[in-house]
Amino acid sequence: MEQQLEQIREQQKETWNKFSAGWKKWDDITMDWLKPMGDEIIRLLHPKNNDIVLDVAAGTGEPGLTIASMLNGGKVIITDLAEDMLAIARENASQRGIKNIETLACDVCKLPFADNTFDAISCRFGFMFFPDMLLAAKEMVRVLKPGGRIATSVWNVPEKNFWVTVTLGAINRNLELPAPPQGSPGIFRCAKDGFISDLFLQAGLKNISQVEIAGKLNSKTVDVYWNMITEVAAPVVAGLSKADDAMKAKIKEEVYQALNQKYPDGNIFVDSSALVIYGEK
């Protein structure tokens, strides 16, 4: 089992390093789209001036950078498995003049921090990709101070996330791809109502709450949507890599048709929905 988890971890690391260029290119659109989830995490964590905060699976730096900008005397440690993503986070911090951050490439299942180090922990869209989610939750709880707060977001059910199902649906209709092994990392792995709440409970957290947060991916045009989704969404890229050029063109045409049908005015604001879960140590 340990070897299997290690394999998943290395796969994740490779994937996110590979995708870092796409995330950098589309950072403005993606950060605007994911902001409501980050805002809710921040609202729940209620960062105080001297807080030491950990942002796990932070990618290009959010919500850690925004939290850091709110602290006067505190700091944020921004972590991710992929060093190439953290390089973008440092760049973003520099552009915004945010100095009270540190970045560290590390595995959430083996956090390199002492017990009871952090006042708060944020993790926006990380849990779905952790090889061992319970171990990750327990590690976060370990490094959290007694009374510390943790908040995370995960994607809600497929029916509420047209931003990705419109493309994955077309891929699955046209390609006979094998189903991934049960419980393997994926976008909707944590979508079941109460899934993360139960995990938090098992990890020893209390005062747990869950709220649904809607978002809109404002890609404006179908072209922008397609170019973005095929550069930042790992399952989309993985699916398309199994198609020849003719099949790719067919899938693309179906996605364009579906989007144009749903948004006939040509203004592509694509629906998304996430669950934000909070707990205290």
Image (cartoon, rainbow, N blue to C red):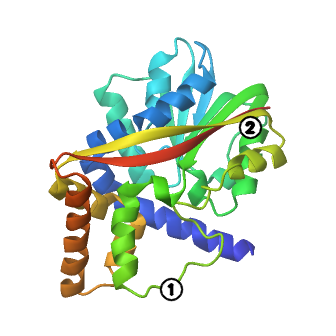
The tag on residue 74 is none
Q: Quadrant of residue 53?
A: top right
Q: Camera-side residue: 75 or 12?
A: 12
Instruction: Read off the residue under disc 2.
Output: 143
As drawn, the label of residue 178 is 1
* Quadrant of the drawing holding the C terminus: top right
Q: Is residue 280 above or below residue 46?
A: below
Which kind of residue does numbered mark 2 sit on? Val
Image coordinates of residue 139 in percent, x first then y, are: 74, 47
Between the C-alphas of marks 2 and 1, the distance is: 38 Å
Q: Visible in this render: residue 274?
A: yes
- For the N terminus, the image quarter is bottom right
- Residue 90: x and y in percent read 38, 37
Q: Please, is residue 226 above or below residue 184 in the view?
A: above
Secondary structure beneath disc 2?
helix
Q: Mark 2 vs mark 1: which is more N-terminal?
A: 2
Mark 2 packing: few (<14 Cα in 10 Å), some, or many (20+)? many
Q: Position of residue 199 (x, y in %)?
A: 76, 50
Look at 66% across and 28% down and name the residue there: 120
| Pointer 1 local density, CA inside 10 Å: few below 14, some 14–19, many at least 20 | few
Q: Relative to the observer, which residue lies in front, 76 or 227?
A: 227
Q: Amino acid at mark 1?
A: Pro
